[in-house]
Amino acid sequence: MSDDAPLLSVQDLSVGFEGFDGYAAVVDGVDLTVEHGEVVTIAGETGCGKSVTTKAITGLLDEPPARVSGTVEFDGQDLRDLPDDERRALNGDRISVIFQNPLSSLNPVFTIGEQLTDTAQFGGHGDTGIVGYLRRRLSSGDRSAARERVLELLKEVRMPDPESVMDSYPSELSGGMRQRAIIAQALLNEPDLLIADEPGSALDVTVHDEILSLLEDLIEERDMSILMITHNLGVARQLSDRVYIMYGGRIAETAPTAAIFDTPRHPYTQGLIASIPRLSGESMAGGIGGSVPEYTAPPLGCRFHPRCPYADDSCRSSEPPAVSFGDAARSACVRHAEGDAGPVPTLEETKRRLSEPERTPAEGHR
């Protein structure tokens, strides 16, 4: 596969779930790419569809109850066409995931050493069966080499006293140590793509910063491709080459990281950035009013229009097209469409409008 093609290419990805309240269209027509050696972040509020998107990419959603459509190409191969065992093998070899909650990602009845050594031995082999598993697990040479590899990785992720950690159970470790163990596990088989879902979000501020610093160093040293999920724009700014802003299951805007923060074009992006507290104490009181839409009855047109201070009838009647601004930047807002009246609003203008008291949300829900 040519390096000119993206390592990961997602086209028109949609995910929905049938529930008691009706069908919920949680992800709606998402397009995204991750280039070789690129760090890409999907950012947005909790509930906007970020984690569901990555679970669909990695095949971790059961169909049914999930309904998944679209294409997910990894290194030129459509993952959705692969048999289940081949896809599981790929996930254990060339694609690794750092899950949001390290405690729930580790088996409580096995030591850290047992779990990570199993990953080093069996990651990328798919379903080996109980006989194959026991044969390889009881091979002293293979097991010893795998254990040494685990110790190396624990040291690389700056795990305190890694030898002792190898014999410890997850419940005996701190949150930061469990997160380091999960990162080491994800790196054991030298993946081409690492997916990190809210890394460090369950940790206190100091340990969270340590984990981000660790990831930053690992990214620089290994030149990995990374798809990261976060609601924290500070994390996106610190680690990413490019950012996708997601709202209501759709991509609202994408651009290189510097452009997202210097010249945000979508009102939702502007609202997120304006909501970030400043060291001076200045911040937008109340943030963006309202909440993410109900996926069983999403708004017609632009899904952000009930919370948008610029919404008009065209926003409520049709989904806005994604307008390109060059340099891999696109924004899905009718204010950018050709012939639309009025300039792109500035960040300060959006901040002022979102802060206006008693602003009535736009109508247009189904």
Image (spheres, helix red, strand yellow):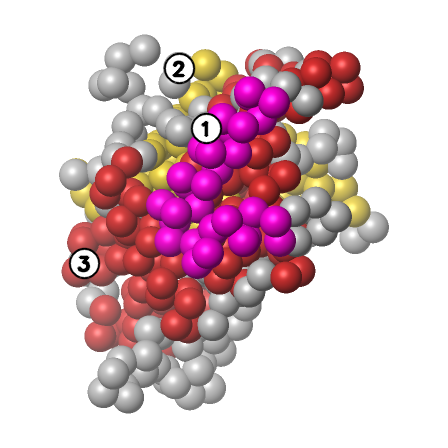
Q: Secondary structure at mark 1?
A: loop
118 lies above or below 283 = above
Query: Residue at the spot x=28%, y=19% of the render?
Result: 5
Residue at numbered disc 3:
263
Look at label 1 and name its amino acid: Asn
- Sequence-first disc among 3 and 1: 1
Q: Mark 2 or mark 3, which is nearer to you?
A: 2
Horizontal side of 195 relative to 106 (left or right) equals: left
| Quarter of the image where the N terminus is located | top left
Q: Which of the two residues, 1 or 357, is positioned nearer the viewer here?
A: 1
Query: Residue at the spot x=25%, y=83% of the render?
Result: 279
Look at label 3 and name its amino acid: Thr
Q: Secondary structure at mark 2?
A: loop
Residue at numbered disc 2:
76
- Sequence-first disc among 1 and 2: 2
Residue 119, image x and y in percent?
57, 32
Neighbour class for label 3 at 10 Å: few (<14), some, many (≥20)?
some
Label 2, label 3: how far apart the Cα atoms are: 33 Å
Q: Which of the two residues, 211 or 260, is positioned nearer the viewer here?
A: 211
Label 1, label 2: how far apart the Cα atoms are: 21 Å
Residue 12, image x and y in percent?
48, 30
Q: Mark 3 or mark 1, which is nearer to you?
A: 1
Residue at numbered disc 1:
189
